[in-house]
Image: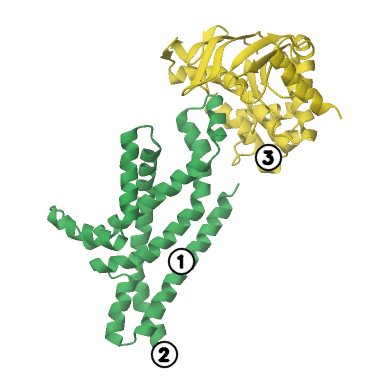
């Protein structure tokens, strides 16, 4: 039978494990935004080799399951003589995978702006740096916000994958909890509630941000 | 403000194998209004956009007050910084207004003054308010473009250009995207500007404006400048069959 006390008791250890879920997805998106911006710049550049590098980056990272990438990175690093804690490999891989999607989100948003927006700025003699900072980016960021929130929510869920390299985040903690209590249903249901709660908060935050940035 | 002159000398422009401009010669005297008319695809907008080098012409010369734009010497590109300096004294108004939607009307006008003219916020805001008052939008300064009608948006765009105190204004079909009842308010602002002695090049389908406001009308067809003369010579005594055919469509459309 489903035990309500067990269900409620499961939350405390899982909530403690959620710090890794938040760390992996939070740091993943933050670094992903930075790397994604760089990849996006390469993708939009006039140089064909740079565009090729960006295309390669995006197609590899989007085309291989994140679980496989985690395992590849985790086992590859020691081979090439890099010894880092599992959490570093996990965050790094998450950020790099996220960067591929984020660069595409930004490229799409920038390309969606009418050409005339930048042209009007160029025509009055604005410097390229100002054209980007004052005209293109504010609009592109606002336009990309819904998709970035979407990406963040996907990352929170994808962070369950880093359990395979031994990070004790929500999913792995619930597996451990289920094994010791022999009450998998209550434990996994608690884990589900936790993920849902995190993502509902993020979605609400995203809507608030969109509202703030709406023109 | 001193009005600038524009000399266009044997300008050619290609898009791949397609020749958009063929040996175009045109002089726009200072303080005068020159309307450029012609069928769509005839190169009018391309020619206008070459004047501030938004479009790069491939050969020939375009001189603003005698100074070559876009190239140091024929064939060698101009430094980006020098090109920007030249552009900031050439105002441009686009068919689609191209206002920046994330800024208010005043913000749109002030932006160039701050970033290009290096004014401080207060000074730029004041100058923007003056320009908006001039186009009759003193009460819309704090509105974002989405809250404005097409005619109001285009007047903000004109204010944005004139606030920079240009010596030359380029209009690329400024009323083509407007509902018919909003065309008049934009044309009136343009007439006032012309009366002040601004040099203006206007690509337009408004034959009434060309007839009554222009000092000269240039007719283009298939990338060639067919004729440039007084409005009455071009509009009422066209001697070229292409011009007659083009003008006939207007007469037919307006006879009801």
Identified at 69% across, 32% down, the residue is B154
Which residue in the protein does label 2 denote? A2
Which chain is the one coloured yellow?
A: B
Q: Is residue B108 left or right of residue B255?
A: left
Q: Quadrant of the C terminus of chain B?
A: top right
- Element type at marker 3? loop
Q: Is residue A50 above or below residue B161?
A: below
Give the total number of marks visible in the rendering.
Answer: 3
Q: Is residue B128 left or right of residue A27?
A: right
Q: Quadrant of the N terminus of chain B?
A: top right
Percent of width and height locating residue B6: 60, 10
Residue A199, label in figure: 1
Which subunit holds the residue at mark 3?
B
Identified at 36% across, 60% down, the residue is A25
Which residue in the protein does label 3 denote? B142
Disc 3 to disc 1, C-alpha distance = 37 Å
Q: Residues within 10 Å of mark 3 (few under 14, many from 20)?
A: few
Let me know if marks 2 and 1 both belong to one chain. yes
Colour theme = by chain
Let me know if marks 3 and 1 both belong to one chain. no
**In front of the other: A43 or B218:** B218
Disc 2 to disc 1, C-alpha distance = 25 Å
Q: Is residue A123 shown to the viewer in this render? A: yes
Q: Please tell me which of labels 2 and 1 falls first in the chain.
A: 2
Q: Is residue A83 shown to the viewer in this render? A: no
Which subunit holds the residue at mark 2?
A
């Amino acid at each position: 039978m489903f035990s309500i006390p067990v269900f409620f008791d499961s939350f405390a250890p899982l909530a403690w494990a959620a710090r890794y879920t938040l760390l992996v997805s939070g740091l993943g998106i933050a670094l992903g935004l930075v790397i994604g911006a760089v990849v996006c710049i390469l993708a939009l550049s006039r140089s064909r080799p740079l565009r090729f590098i960006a295309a390669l980056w995006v197609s590899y990272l989007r085309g291989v399951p994140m679980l496989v990438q985690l395992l590849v990175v985790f086992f590859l690093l020691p081979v090439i003589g890099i010894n880092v804690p599992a959490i570093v490999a996990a965050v790094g891989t998450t950020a790099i995978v996220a960067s591929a999607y984020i660069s595409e989100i930004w490229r799409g948003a920038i390309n969606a702006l009418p050409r005339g927006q930048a042209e009007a700025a160029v025509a009055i003699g604005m410097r390229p740096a100002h054209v980007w900072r004052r005209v293109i980016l504010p609009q592109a960021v606002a336009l990309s916000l819904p998709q970035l929130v979407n990406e963040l929510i996907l990352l929170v869920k994808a962070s369950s994958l880093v359990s395979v390299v031994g990070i004790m985040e929500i999913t792995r903690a619930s597996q451990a909890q289920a094994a010791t209590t022999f009450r998998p249903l209550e434990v996994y249901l608690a884990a589900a509630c936790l993920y849902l709660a995190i993502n509902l908060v993020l979605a609400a935050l995203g809507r608030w941000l969109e509202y703030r940035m709406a023109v | 403000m001193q009005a600038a002159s524009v000399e266009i000398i044997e300008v050619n422009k290609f898009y791949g194998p397609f020749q958009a401009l063929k040996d175009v010669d045109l002089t726009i005297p200072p303080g005068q209004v020159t309307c450029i008319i012609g069928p769509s695809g005839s190169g009018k907008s391309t020619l206008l956009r070459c004047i501030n080098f938004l479009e790069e012409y491939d050969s020939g010369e375009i001189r603003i007050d005698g100074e070559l734009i876009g190239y140091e010497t024929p064939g060698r590109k101009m430094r980006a910084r020098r090109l920007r300096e030249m552009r900031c004294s050439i105002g441009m108004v686009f068919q689609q207004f191209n206002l920046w939607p994330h800024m208010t009307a005043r913000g749109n006008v002030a932006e160039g003054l701050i970033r290009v003219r290096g004014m401080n916020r207060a000074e730029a805001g004041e100058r923007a308010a003056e320009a908006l008052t001039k186009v009759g939008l003193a009460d819309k300064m704090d509105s974002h473009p989405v809250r404005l009608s097409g005619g109001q948006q285009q007047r903000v765009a004109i204010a944005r250009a004139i606030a920079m105190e240009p010596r030359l204004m380029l209009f690329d079909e400024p009323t083509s995207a407007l509902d018919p009842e909003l065309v008049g308010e934009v044309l009136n602002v343009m007439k006032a500007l012309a009366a002040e002695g601004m040099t203006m090049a206007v690509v337009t389908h408004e034959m009434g404006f060309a007839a009554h406001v222009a000092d000269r009308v240039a007719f283009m067809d298939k990338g060639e400048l067919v004729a440039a003369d007084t409005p009455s010579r071009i509009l009422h005594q066209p001697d070229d069959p292409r011009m007659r055919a083009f003008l006939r469509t207007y007469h037919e459309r307006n006879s009801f």
